[in-house]
Image (spheres, rainbow, N blue to C red):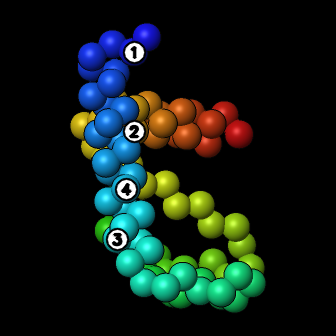
Amino acid sequence: MLSNQSMKMKIALTVITSLIATAVFAFDPPPVGSAAPDFSLTDAKGKTHSLSQYKSKYVVLEMVQSGMPVCEEALRQRQHAKVAG
């Protein structure tokens, strides 16, 4: 059984995921097999990246929230895997 804190965290993550999905899919998604719409994001170092820069490459977007232990642990694991690999 989940602890009270774990249950609250699970609920918070569900709400956050729902909000992100609502924001991302507020428009009609492109048809399967078509190109994704271009967009730009700024990384932690202030450099802007656009999806079109990574044409023909795999792109993984990971949405995290600072201050959320589950998200911070996922980031630590990803950074550790990046350094190890």
Task: Determine the CA span between mark 3 and mark 4.
Answer: 9 Å
Q: How far is disc 1 from disc 2 in space, using C-alphas?
A: 18 Å
Provide residue 2's location: percent of width, then percent of height: 39, 15
Q: Quadrant of the C terminus?
A: top right
In the depicted view, which residue is nearer to us: 15 or 42? 15
Contact (Cβ within 8 Å) of mark 1 with mark 2: no
Few, some or many residues within 10 Å of mark 2 (<14, 14–19, 20+)? some
What quarter of the picture does the N terminus occupy?
Answer: top left
Name the N-terminal-most of marks 3 and 1.
1
Residue under numbered circle 3: 23
Nearer the observer: mark 2 or 4; the answer is 4
Please name the residue that numbered disc 2 is placed on: 71
The residue type indicated by label 4 comes to Ser
For marks 2 and 3, the one nearer the N-term is 3
Q: Position of residue 70 (x, y in %)?
A: 40, 32
CB within 8 Å, label 2 to label 3: no
Tell me if label 3 and label 1 are in contact, CB under 8 Å.
no
Q: Secondary structure at mark 4?
A: helix
Q: Is residue 67 left or right of residue 45?
A: left
In this view, 16 is above or below 59 = above
For badge 2, the amino acid type reads: Cys
